[in-house]
């Protein structure tokens, strides 16, 4: 069987001089604590601290990167055990599901998922042979047996991985029971929430009308009125802050913002609340709400993350059966310059506003995002995200952004993952690629090795803590 290939110089430059500089830089930052300020791990794991059940539950079921690839090759999501939204039958046998991954592991060659998985198998579970059909049973039994130990409980793994803080992401209607369970304990400083109000802001959702009513029930505010609705969102933000949140997150399809009059806002909100808004009105409502939410960030100091550029739920048949976040979101062209101007015209010069911009449209890096972040003090650029959270994607980001925005208008790395055990691997890739990029600058005599070492630490640790106000 083929061995797992994890060369100590992986991802470093091929030429010896640059590689040696990269290795020296990496040696200084490789063991720094992990700051994971944006992600989608389950807070239940850290509150209840129960053992993970089996290898399939950990590596396949929550990871849309994995089953997206399998689905692309004709493997049904029901065969992978993905729960159905419509209540239909799906495979329940975790061994059969694991065997499907093993039989098709070759599909992941040269993908970041393969690099992350190989690293976890090798470093966390001590496996040395690459996953394949012949060793699928051994892999499953070995991983599942190890998961039963106390040293594989979520909190123990947090310590083992040297994760200093991890942020989960919850919707505005989430009552945060798991964060409440760790409130006023030392873990409250290490596991925090993030406020994502898409469930009450995205007017295109099928449940938007009922969600606005639930928001009223949850807060006691009259969400039948525009001001009552805004006050209810403010109230939920306050609750999230009490449970550790320092940031908000907004997964809108575009970066469009608006600055309507109050009368226009009231009329538009009434249309949305009626359930009869059209697509154009829904987009305008999202645009206005980004501006309203930016104003709230000016008030309460929460960092605002904007994640546009995904055509969500592109596969309508899969959406009807399995719901959101099942691997059928697709990047699309995104405008930032015109889209953000209404928001920035109103709040862009406010000293208490911090916005982190992410994109799935790489063509905007040098043309729009870097110049915007290189000018507005409130703007910083999030790292390569989602489809571009990869070695080449990270390099493209640094090459296209740095000359205009510099390093100090970026926020380091975040893993944005549901796959808990992949977090160290993802951060290690980012650290290696940043050292590779910096090493190139050193050997070209553009910065000194001393300065490169300082920047490497900031990209690895300092920038994320500062950008997300984590102390």
Image (cartoon, rainbow, N blue to C red):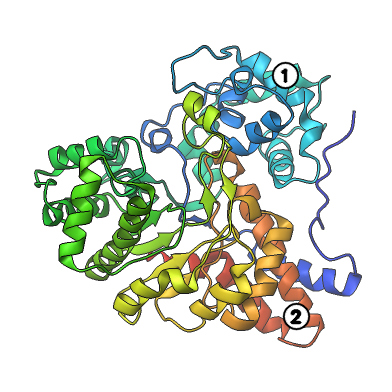
- Residue 60 position in % (x across, y down): 61, 29
Residue 135 picture quarter: top right
Q: Is residue 282 left or right of residue 125?
A: left
On-image quarter of the C terminus: bottom left
> What crowding class fits label 2: few (fewer than 14 Cα within 10 Å), some (14-19), or many (20 or more)?
some
For residue 455, what is the image quadrant?
A: bottom right
Name the residue at 81% across, 21% down.
Answer: 133
| Quarter occupied by residue 79 | top right
Indicate the quadrant containing the N terminus: top left, top right, bottom left or bottom right. top right
Q: Is residue 233 visible?
A: no
Residue 419 numbered mark, or none: none
Q: Going by the image, does 302 lie left or right of 261?
A: right
Q: Which of marks 2 and 1 is nearer the N terminus?
A: 1
Q: Which of 354 and 215 is in front in this view?
A: 215
Compared with 211, 318 (above or below) is: above
Q: Are marks 2 and 1 in contact (CB under 8 Å)?
A: no
Using the numbered discs, state the Cα–Cα distance from disc 2 to disc 1 in whole angstroms.
Answer: 45 Å
Query: Residue 374's spot in the image, x, y percent?
Result: 52, 82
**Element carrying mark 1:** helix
The answer to whether one can see residue 431 in this image is: yes
**On screen, residue 375 above or below 4:** below
Q: Residue 447, image x and y in percent? A: 71, 86
Image location of residue 81, percent across then percent down: 57, 20
At x 45%, y 73%, the residue is: 338
Mark 2 sits on what residue? 441
Q: Mark 1 points at which residue?
A: 99
Residue at image position (58%, 38%) is 328
Give the crowd class for mark 1: few <14, some 14-19, many >=20 residues within 10 Å.
many
For the residue pair 293 and 11, the one nearer the viewer reads as 293
């Amino acid at each position: 069987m083929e061995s797992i290939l994890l060369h100590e110089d992986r991802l470093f430059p091929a030429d010896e001089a640059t590689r040696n500089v990269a290795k020296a830089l990496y040696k200084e930052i490789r063991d720094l604590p992990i700051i994971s300020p944006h992600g989608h791990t389950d807070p239940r794991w850290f509150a209840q601290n129960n053992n993970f059940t089996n290898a399939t539950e950990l590596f396949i079921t929550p990871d849309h990167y994995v089953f997206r690839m399998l689905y692309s090759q004709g493997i049904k999501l029901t065969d992978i055990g993905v729960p159905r939204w419509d209540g239909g039958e799906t495979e329940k046998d975790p061994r059969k599901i694991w065997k499907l991954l093993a039989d098709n592991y070759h599909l992941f060659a040269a993908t970041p998922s393969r690099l992350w998985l190989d690293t976890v198998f090798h470093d966390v579970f001590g496996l040395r042979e690459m996953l394949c059909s012949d060793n699928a049973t051994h892999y499953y039994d070995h991983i599942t047996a190890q998961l039963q130990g106390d040293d594989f409980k979520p909190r123990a793994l947090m310590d083992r991985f040297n994760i200093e803080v991890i942020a989960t992401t919850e919707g505005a209607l989430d009552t945060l029971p798991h964060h409440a369970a760790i409130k006023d304990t030392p873990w409250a400083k290490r596991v925090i929430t993030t406020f994502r109000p898409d469930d009450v802001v995205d007017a295109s959702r099928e449940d938007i009308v009922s969600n606005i009513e639930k928001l009223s029930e949850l807060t006691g505010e009259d969400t039948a009125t525009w001001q009552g609705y805004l006050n209810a969102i403010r109230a939920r933000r306050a609750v999230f802050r009490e449970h550790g949140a320092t940031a908000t997150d907004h997964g809108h399809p575009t970066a469009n913002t608006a600055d309507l009059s109050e009368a226009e806002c009231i009329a538009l909100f009434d249309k949305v609340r009626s359930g009869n808004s059209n697509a154009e009105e829904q987009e305008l409502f999202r645009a206005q709400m980004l501006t309203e939410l930016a104003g709230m960030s000016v008030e309460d100091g929460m960092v605002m993350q904007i994640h546009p550029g995904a055509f969500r739920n592109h596969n309508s048949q899969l959406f009807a059966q399995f719901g959101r976040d099942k691997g059928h979101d697709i990047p699309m062209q995104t405008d930032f310059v015109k889209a953000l101007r209404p928001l920035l015209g109103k709040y862009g010069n406010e000293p208490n506003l911090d916005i982190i911009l992410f994109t799935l449209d790489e063509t905007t890096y040098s043309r729009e995002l870097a110049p915007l972040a290189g000018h507005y003090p409130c703007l910083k650029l999030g790292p390569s995200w989602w489809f571009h959270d990869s070695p080449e994607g990270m390099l493209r980001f640094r090459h296209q952004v740095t000359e205009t925005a510099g390093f100090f208008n970026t926020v380091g790395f975040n893993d944005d993952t549901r796959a808990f055990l992949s977090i160290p691997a993802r951060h290690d890739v980012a650290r290696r690629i940043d050292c590779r990029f910096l090493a190139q600058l050193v050997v070209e005599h553009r910065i000194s090795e001393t300065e490169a070492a300082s920047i490497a630490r900031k990209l690895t640790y300092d920038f994320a803590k500062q950008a997300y106000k984590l102390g």
